[in-house]
Amino acid sequence: MIVRKLRLDKGWSQEQLAEISGLSVRTVQRIERGQKPSLETLKSLAAAFEIEVTDLTMETTMSNQAKMTAEEEQAIVYVRDIKGFYTHLIIYAVVIVLLFVLNLIRRPDHIWAVWPAIGWGIGVLFHGLNVFEVFNLFGPGWEKRQIDKRLQRDS
């Protein structure tokens, strides 16, 4: 978690941190997800961030500036959701265009590619509505009510 915060403070991507520190991107991803790094990995990260190894190992000694706030965590999750939606949208567009090209080459008299475009398009639409919270049917409020409801039954 601290590694992610320090990386974001520097404006680096995971790939850039991996290159600067001499680690693999996969190692950086694992550490940011909470896996415990080896001493050699910690030394590489500390050198990349120009800090002491102890600053990476002892979260309580880190200044408040380096800690991830709940707001920052929510912002990161939101940006990932938006990125996922745009990736979904681009893949949808590319595949549907290819299906229409294939359709026009093989059977131009019968346009069958419209059916996958409509079906998958509905999925993309709902994905976008969910990400941009147009209809917040299953949002945090709903989750809180469900948790409260379950806890009251179990008590």
Image: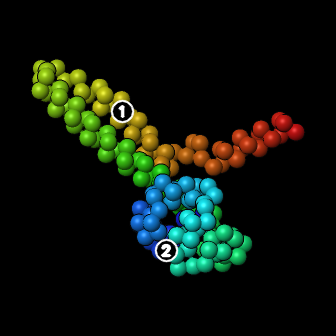
Tell me the amino acid under the disc marked 1: Trp
Residue bearing the label numbered 2: 48
41 or 138: which is nearer to us? 41
Image quarter for residue 67?
bottom right
Residue bearing the label numbered 1: 120
Q: Nearer the viewer, mark 2 or mark 1?
A: 2
Q: Secondary structure at mark 2?
A: helix
Q: Secondary structure at mark 1?
A: helix
- The quadrant in which the C terminus is found is top right
What numbered label is drawn on residue 94?
none
Whole-percent x and y of residue 25?
45, 57
77 or 52: which is nearer to us? 52
Residue 74 visible to an observer of this rendering: no
Residue 61 visible to an observer of this rendering: yes
Q: Residue at x 21, y 35 (%)?
A: 98
Q: Is residue 30 above or below residue 45?
A: above
Q: Residue at x 72, y 72 (%)?
A: 60
